[in-house]
Image (cartoon, rainbow, N blue to C red):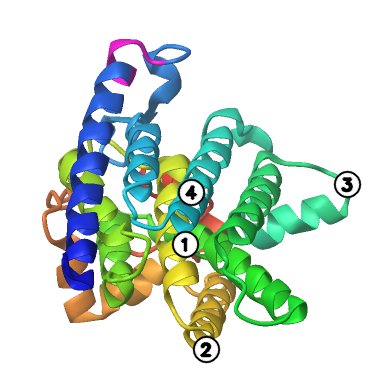
Amino acid sequence: MSRRGARAGALLRAGLVAGAVTVAARRVLDTDPPGGAARWTRTNHRGEPVSMLEGPAVAAGLSAGALAGSDPRTRTAAALATAGAGAFGLVDDLAEDASTRTKGLRGHLGALARGTLTTGGLKVLGIGATSMVAAAVGTRRTGGAAGHAADVVVNGALVAGTANLLNLLDLRPGRAFKAATVLSLPVAGGSVPAAGAVVGAAAAAAPGDLAERDMLGDGGANALGALVGAQWAFGAPRAVRVAALGAVVGLTLASERVSFSAVIDRTPWLRRVDRLGRRPAPETAAPETAAPEAASGADEDARA
């Protein structure tokens, strides 16, 4: 089989595996939700119940889809990064104290500097650690020790940063799946079949997300971003990876002051894509604008 055929096969395999595991995991979780269904239910802006069980189901599907890659080293690293981001995001979803919640990356880092470990701070540390371990596993040595160490740091930061960025974007139904698909396409031919896994998981989960019955939560959105980041980290040249990391850092810093949702709503073509497949906004709802993503907190604040 040609190299192109092998990559196409890996993408298809990843999509089928991710979709199947997402469906299977969701059925198991629906049958017996850990801690009871109420623990996983939020109320959205329509006053309707929304389930967060989508998050762990999608994280499981994406982790399984990541293992469909052809290279043992990078598929192991991608699955590790995805599972780690999903797990620590899920902790933040379920254990966060809403009455004392610290918002935004800057807020959590500030709390850590003061000696206070929030669930968001734990997530930052946990995703950072698992991303670095994944980078150490998946980064091939192409030069001396110093160059390899620099590559590991860049790759780990790119995985962790993209995990956070997708969570910042997941403030409207379906947005995270759309963003992840677009971000995966430029490097879809690499050794991590993230594009196939994203499409497979989206085919299984996006209908409920778009209909506002389900939501990804931090667990699902962080896993989605980590897999996309791993695809870039292990499939792009060094110069591209450094540029991508710069873009991720820049967007993350911008989110402290600028609302991505407001920018999307002011840009006609982005607004059309963002609303594609979604339910119409209720007539009594406020215009679709939001405070800066870092200030508005996790996606359940904006969507629930």
Asked if the residues shown at circle 4 and circle 1 are in contact, with their CB atoms under 8 angstroms apart, the answer is no
Residue shown at 33% from the left, 19% from the top: 29
Q: Amino acid at mark 1?
A: Ala
Q: Is residue 19 left or right of residue 82?
A: left
- State the residue lying farthest toward the bottom: 239
Between residues 95 and 256, which one lies in front from this camera angle?
Answer: 95
Determine the image quadrant of residue 106.
bottom right
Give the structural element (helix, strand or loop) at label 3: loop
Mark 3, residue position: 115
The stretch of residues the image draws in magenta is: 29-33
Q: Position of residue 250 (x, y in %)?
A: 55, 80
- Which label sits in the foreground, 1 or 3? 1
Mark 2, residue position: 239
Which mark is first along the chain, 2 or 1?
A: 1
Which mark is first along the chain, 2 or 4?
A: 4
Q: Which mark is residue 76?
A: 4
In the image, residue 264 above or below residue 178: below
Mark 1, residue position: 230
Q: Is residue 12 left or right of residue 105?
A: left
